[in-house]
Amino acid sequence: MLEDRATAAPSPTAWPTAYPEGYAVVDVETTGLARDDRIISAAVYRLDSRGEVEDHWYTMVNPERDPGPVWIHGLTSEALEGAPLFSDIAEEFAARLDGRVLVAHNAVFDWQMIAREYARAEREAPVRQRLCTIALSKELGLPLPNHKLESLAAHFGVVQQRAHHALDDARVLAEAFRPSLRAAAAGSVRLPLQECRPLTEWRDTATPRIGQQAGGGGGSGYGGGGYGSYRPTSWRPSRKRPACPYPNPGRYEEGKRLKQGMRIAFSGDTSIERDLLEDRAIEAGLHVATSLSRLTSLLVTNDPDAGTSKVVKARQYGTPVIDEAAFGQLLRDVEPASEQ
């Protein structure tokens, strides 16, 4: 299998000539997952064509707003007060991305956040291609229990020191990407590169538009709506979902963790592609429901005042309602069914 050869680099003559000449492994921590959320820290590990580290860089960023879930990323308003604005670090950040393929875990999210920040600063990120390590692990057929960074790290024996700290997450990803890249090269695997089209203008009062990304059905292997595209979610063809193996523990309680088996319903547009958001929920052990009933544990919507049938029923049933950003943060730490 390809992963069995992951630690052995191919000989110089065997290395695929079509592979990129350099990579920028990136991680950004943000105030949330919505369109108007901001980057609060960023890290870049620059790698050469064979995945060897050249250097690394880290910065905090003043988001000029509430930092969001401090209990996850640990960056308080006080810590960020003296940090540079994104416009202050945009040039240095760009220099570390220039001419390289952006590599990230769930790369479409990191790219969208970076593209928006550059648009706000009236600049353009020098990124033309991205590579998602979720997609690469699927191409390699790695036997991972899920697509979390911690699972990829554990597969390659990489030790996490500070989860959700941009610098350590970028380090972990860089160390896991190197053997993945070598395995791909040894097996002559075509890298799942995706095109990055920049966001050329930004208005805070309007929905930002990022150019359609290439490879709608490819990307990290999420099917259906197209992992590589960015567009408001409206009508989507139905997808057959696997049955949730866990019993429904009941409704979500504010301030507590989500639990595996909870029934989650979505309503309205989401900034992250809906299919991707639903897949992430399923991978976390949640039950994604297409309709809302008295058994629904939680409704996720960015417009709680909308008159959609799901929102109306949620009010009638007393179903808890949260927005996409809050749900994204809760997805990072779902309580296992065994702890119920």
Image (cartoon, rainbow, N blue to C red):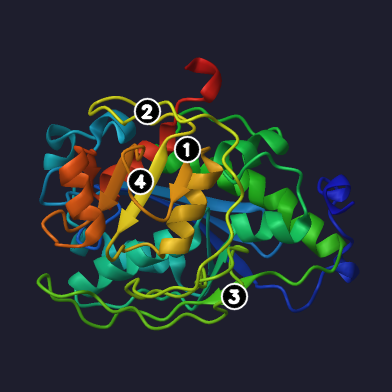
Considering only vertical position in the picture, is 231 above or below 297? below
Label 2 crowding class (10 Å Cα cut-off): few <14, some 14-19, many 20+? some
The mark nearer the N terminus, 3 or 1, is: 1
Tell me, for residue 328, which label it has, or none.
Answer: 4
State whether residue 300 appears in this view.
Answer: yes
Label 2 to label 3, Cα distance in Å?
35 Å
Which residue is identified by label 2?
A: 250
Considering only vertical position in the picture, is 218 above or below 316? below
The mark nearer the N terminus, 1 or 4, is: 1
Label 1 to label 4, Cα distance in Å?
20 Å
Residue at 14 percent across and 75 percent down: it is: 206
The amino acid sitting under disc 1 is Asp
Q: Of circles 4 and 2, which is in front? A: 2
Considering only vertical position in the picture, is 266 above or below 159? below
Nearest the viewer among 122 and 226 is 226
Residue 259, quarter of picture? top left
Position of residue 86 in the picture relative to residue 263 (left or right): left
Q: Of circles 3 and 1, which is in front? A: 3
Label 1 to label 2, Cα distance in Å?
35 Å
The mark nearer the N terminus, 2 or 3, is: 3
Label 4 to label 3, Cα distance in Å?
23 Å
Which residue is identified by label 1?
A: 168
